[in-house]
Amino acid sequence: MGIEKLNIHLIFFALVILQLSIFSVVNVASAASDEQDIEALIENFNAQDVDVKADSVKVPVAAGEPAVGPLIQTLDSKDPEIRENTAINLGKIKDERAIDPLVKLLTDEEWEVESAATNALVEIGKPAIEPLIKILQE
């Protein structure tokens, strides 16, 4: 009986933690509605603090369309980790405006960035097919 009660408490605790983390991301995303806030979060894509980095990578996805412009601008960063995380975010947002900038990353000197761009294009899906075919034909 004691183990069952402990399991119920652990499940309840896990649900509370999950709810708080979702609430936290939604609140940060709603607070990050303008481009300056989003740009500040993007700067943390290569943060040393794992929690800061994890939150900075989640929030642009939660913000959605308003984050696309600043994210696309960030693809030119000299920091490969920022380019990689930006590509990952753009893939999760699935905005077609990101296709051409992501295609340019397919020749990035860092394989992690190239891989992230490839995966992002796969996540965007069907709209990315025509630009990729065009590149193959050239």
Image (cartoon, rainbow, N blue to C red):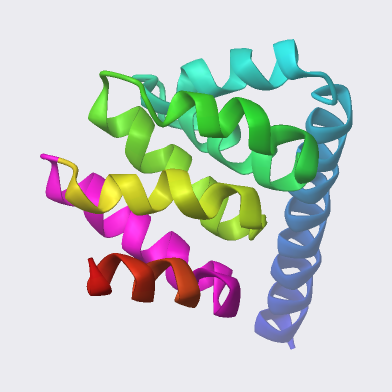
From the viewer's perspective, is residue 40 above or below residue 24?
A: above
Residue 27, given in percent of the width and then of the height, sits at 87, 33
Which residue is drawn at the image coordinates 61% and 13% (left, top)? Answer: 40
Which residue is drawn at the image coordinates 86% and 23% (left, top)? Answer: 31
- Residue 46's image quarter? top left
From the viewer's perspective, is residue 54 above or below residue 125?
A: above
Q: In what quadrant of the picture does the C terminus appear?
A: bottom left
User: In the image, is residue 110 part of the stretch drawn in magenta?
Assistant: yes
Choose between 14 and 68: the one closer to the eye: 68
Q: In what quadrant of the picture does the N terminus appear?
A: bottom right
- Residue 35's image quarter? top right
Residue 108, given in percent of the width and then of the height, sits at 19, 42
Range drawn in magenta: 109-128
Choose between 79 and 135: the one closer to the eye: 135
Residue 65 lies left or right of residue 60; in this view the side is right
Which residue is drawn at the image coordinates 60% and 21% (left, top)? Answer: 41
From the viewer's perspective, is residue 133 above or below residue 58?
A: below
Residue 53 lies left or right of residue 97; in this view the side is left
User: In the image, is residue 105 part of the stretch drawn in magenta?
Assistant: no
Residue 110 lies left or right of residue 129; in this view the side is left
From the viewer's perspective, is residue 119 above or below residue 88?
A: below
